[in-house]
Amino acid sequence: MQTTHTTFPLADQTVHRITFDLTTFTDADLLWLPHHAQITPAGRKRKAEHLAGRIAAAHALSALHDRTLPGIGPNGEPLWSKGISGSITHSGSQAMAIAIRHQNALIGIDCEAILSENDAQEIKGGIIDPQEDAILSRSGFPFALALTLTFSAKESLFKALFPQVKRLMGFDCARVLSLNDTTLTLELNHTLNNIKKNQNITLSWCRFDATIVTLLCRI
């Protein structure tokens, strides 16, 4: 599969980004993965996305002098080497990964295509409550952009929390408090392990053309 590797800074960390050409993917490309048998039954697009994500992760780990690719956990989560915390995301024809040398860092990354205004209005009820709706409407950002950013930030938070809570979480687990040109702050609606209810968590974000990237990295 043809890929291109680039990096960009976010939240004082280096994010590794892979863009890929789906038309060049073949099943033989998966043989590079130690866990290729686990992903073989998936559809073509899913396999290419998974491969691109692991290539991004390999670059992130190489920067830490670690060559062990993350495996796949029982809920599809990446399994990192001991002493490493990381996160992987993909959207469309790109994948991104971040890894740091810390066993229990709170780290999650997510990228999302920006919603259309119509789609944002149709799905907002599953992502935000009326209080959040008002905050996004007053934010100064187009509502679709603000909702995409909120969706992505909550996804990043859930990814960061999953290694600790070991369960899937709904969008009502956190609410957006504020957002600006570089950050978004969420408040937890429930206590999740050692992270207390009402605790504020701030994530960084950036935009690539029609894609939003959010990152939570707390050591």
Image: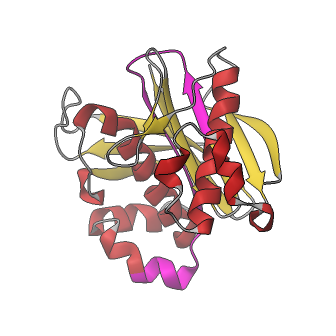
Magenta span includes 99: yes
Image: 11 above or below 170: above
Q: Position of residue 133 (x, y in %)?
A: 37, 68
Relative depth, front residue between 162 and 176: 162
As drawn, is 88 to the left or to the right of 128? Answer: right
**Closer-to-camera residue (35/51):** 35
Name the residue at 55% across, 21% down: 100
Q: Nearer the viewer, residue 68 or 100?
A: 68
Q: Is residue 13 visible?
A: no
Q: Residue at x 62, y 66 (%)?
A: 45
Which stretch is magenta?
Answer: 97-122
Magenta includes 50?
no
Q: Residue 212: percent from the left, percent from the top? A: 61, 56
Task: Give residue 170's quadrant in the image.
Answer: bottom left
Classify 197 as above or below 133: above
89 or 172, which is in the foreground? 89
Image quadrant in which you'd find residue 150: bottom left
- Could one spot residue 70 in this view of the protein? yes
* 93 is higher (above) or lower (below) than 7: below
- Location of residue 186 in the rendering, given as x and y in whole percent from the top left corner: 36, 45
The quarter holding residue 33 reads: top right
Left or right: residue 83 versus residue 211 is left
Quadrant placement of the N terminus: bottom right
Counting the numbered discs, the total is: 0
* Coloring scheme used: secondary structure
| The C terminus, quarter of image | top left
Query: Residue 87 location, x and y as percent?
Result: 51, 37
Which residue is rendered at x = 40% and y = 77% of the image?
Answer: 123
